[in-house]
Image (cartoon, coloured by chain):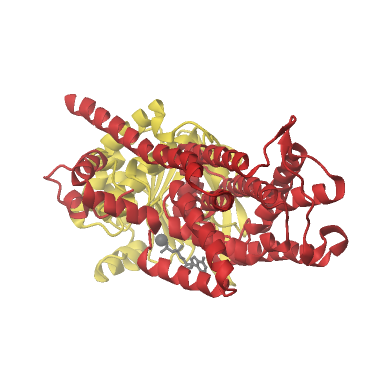
Chain colours: A yellow, B red
Amino acid sequence: MAEPVLEVSGLSKSFGGISVLSDVGFSVARGERRGIIGPNGAGKTTLFNVLSGYLPADAGTVRLCGSDVTTLPAHRRARMGLGRTFQIVALCDELTVEENVLLGLVASNRGEWRLLGSLRGRRGLVERSRELLSEAGLIDLREHKVKAIAYGHRRVLEIVMALTSRARVLLLDEPAAGLSGEESLRMIPLLERLDRDLTIVLIEHDMDVMFNTVDRLLVLDHGTILLEGTPEEVRSSDLVRERYLGTQHAAGAGS
Amino acid sequence: MSNSVSSTLVSLRLRGAKLVAPVLGFGALAMIPYALTLNEIHLLSAMLIFGIFAMSLNLLVGFGGMASLGHALFFGAGAYAVGLLSFHRDSGFALSLLVGLAAAALLALVVGFLVRRARGTAYLMITLAASQVFWGLATQWKAVTNGDDGLFGISSPSILGWDFGSTVTYYYVVLVVVAGVFVLLTAISRSPFGYVLRGVRDNEQRMRAVGVDVDRIRHLALVISAVIASLGGVLYAYQERYVGPDVLAATTSGDGLLAVALGGGAVAGPLVGGLVVGLLEDVVGSYTDRYLMILGILFVLVAIFLPRGLAGLAQSLGDTVRPRRRAAEQAIEQRVEPAQAEVTETEGAHHG
Ligand SMILES: Nc1ncnc2c1ncn2[C@@H]1O[C@H](COP(=O)(O)OP(=O)(O)O)[C@@H](O)[C@H]1O
Ligand SMILES: [Mg+2]
C-alpha cells in the first residue's frame, strides 16, 4: 500500500466537558478514497474541523504528508496541501463565481499580498479557472455573483474551491447535503474524475454517492470509531446495520 | 469565437465608459475654482480632504467588512503630527508629513493587534476606545497638546522653497492628492489583495481554507487605510493652520461612516459621500450646534432610502436612462443561455 498522507492518532475533543471525539485514530494512504459515516452528531464535522485546524485538538496528533500539523493554523495546513469543503457552503457571496475561483488560485500561488496589477487580468489564473469551471459545468455561470446562483451550483463550486489550492488531501463534508436525489447523483462523476493521486476523505449520508466513490469506510459513533473496513464489510456488519444504516433509512436519511 | 472577440470589444468600451465619470468629475473639480470665491475654494478643499478620509475608511469598512468607530485616530495622528511639530519645533511640511504617516502606521500596527480577534460590535468598541484614549490625551495633556485650545502657529506649507499655502494653490495640491488616492485605491480594489480583502469580508472560513492568513490581511488593510487617513489629517492641519481635539473625536469617525454609507460603492462613492458630508458639516455646523442630532437622522435616512448609497442610486438611474448599455453589460456579465432555468431565474437580480 502507498505511504500514508494523513495519520491521525489519539485525537480527542470535547466542548464544555462533553466529549465529542475520543481517542480517534486512523490513517489514509495516498490516492485512497476514504468515507466516514455515522449518525448526526457523531462528531464527523468536528473531526474535519480538528484535522484542518479550525478547532484545536484537546489531545492527539494529526500528521499531514509526514509532518506534524497538530498545532498549525488552518491556512498553514491549507498551504501544505490540505483542501476542504464545508457542510454549510462557505463561499464569497458578493463576488462572482469566477472571482471566487481566482481567489483560491491566487492564494495558492501566494499572490494574495499583491496590491497592484489586476486579479482578473492574470492570464494564467483566468485560464486555469476557466478549465476548472468547464470541468465542473459552471463555466456559463462564471460572471454571476455567487449569491445569485442555484444551491446545487454552489455545492459544486464548493468542491471547485477546494481544487483551486494544490491540495493533496481533500476533506469533503457532505458535498451532496441538501441536494435532490438526481442532483446528488451528478456529484458522483465529478468526484470520480478527480486526480487519482488526490487523497479524499468524504463524509456523506447519501449512500449512492458513498458506495460509488470510496475504497474504505470508517464508521464514527459518539465520537469513537465503531468500525473500519471496505464498503462491503461495513454493509454486512450487523452492528452498523443496527446502529446506523437501519435507523438511517427508518428515519428517512439524515441531513 | 467572433462572439468572444465582440465581447472583448464591448468590455473594452465598458471599461472606457467607466473612466468617463472620474475624468469628467476631476476635470470639473479642476475648473471650478474659476467660478468660486476664495472662501468657497477653501471649503471645497476641506470637503476634498474629508473625501480622502472617507475613501480610506471604506477600504476597511466596504472592502474588509471591518466597521471602525475609531478611524479619527489616524486622521488625528496626521493632523497632530503637523500641529505638534509646528507648535513645538517649527518643523516644515516634508518632515511633518513623514512623521504623520509613520505615526498612523505605527498606531494602526498596535490597534491591529488589539482587534485581531474582534469582529462586529467588538471591533467597533475597541477602535472607538483606542481613539477615545487619544482624544483624552489631546484634551487633558495640556503641556504638550495645549488641550482644548489646540495647536496653532502652523506656517504656510512649502517644499524645496515652493510655498503652496495660498488658498488656490493649496486647493490644487489637495486635488492632486485626492486624485492620487483615488487612483491608488482603484488599483487596490482590482488587485489580488483587494479581492482577497472582499473575500475575507464575505467568508473568512473559505479564505482560510484556500490558505489565506486572514488575520494578517485584515491587519495590513488597517495599516494602509490608516496611512491614507493620516494623509488627509496632514492636509487638514495645513488647510486650517490649526489642530484641536475635535479631529480625534468620535464624531469625526461617525462622519466618516456616514460618508461611506451615503456614498456606497468602491472608491468614487465614498469620495462623493465625503464631499457631501464635508459640506453638510460646514453648512449645518454654522447654523446649529445640533450637528450630532442631524448626523443621526441622516444615518437613519440613508439606511432606509439609500441602502446602497449614492453609488447604488447612480447605478439604478443609469440603468433606467441607458437600458441599452445595461443590456450589453448584462450580456457580458451573465452570458445568459436562455435554456438554463436556474440562470434566468436570478437574472438581473444583482449587479455591480
Ligand atoms: N462548536 C461547538 N460547540 C459545542 N458543541 C459542538 C460544537 N460543534 C459541534 N458540537 C457538538 O458536537 C457534536 C458533534 O457534532 P458534529 O461534529 O457536527 O457532528 P456530525 O457532523 O457527525 O453530525 C454535536 O453534539 C454538536 O452539538
Ligand atoms: Mg456534520
Q: Is residue A210 visible?
A: no
Q: Residue placed at 45% from the left, 50% from the top? A: B206
Q: Is residue A125 above or below residue A229?
A: above
Please count the marks in the image: 0
Q: Residue B289 placed where, x, y %?
A: 60, 74
Task: Name the residue nearer the viewer: A69 or B92.
Answer: B92
- In this rendering, would A221 be left or right of B8? right
Q: Residue placed at 18% from the left, 54% from the top? A: B345
- In this rendering, would B194 be left or right of A87? right
Ligand 2, what quadrant? bottom left
Task: Name the residue nearer the viewer: B241 or A133.
Answer: B241
Task: Name the residue nearer the viewer: A141 or A154.
Answer: A141
Q: Residue A222 placed where, x, y %?
A: 46, 67
Q: Residue B129 placed where, x, y %?
A: 68, 66
Q: Is residue A138 visible?
A: yes
- In this rendering, would A142 be left or right of A10? left
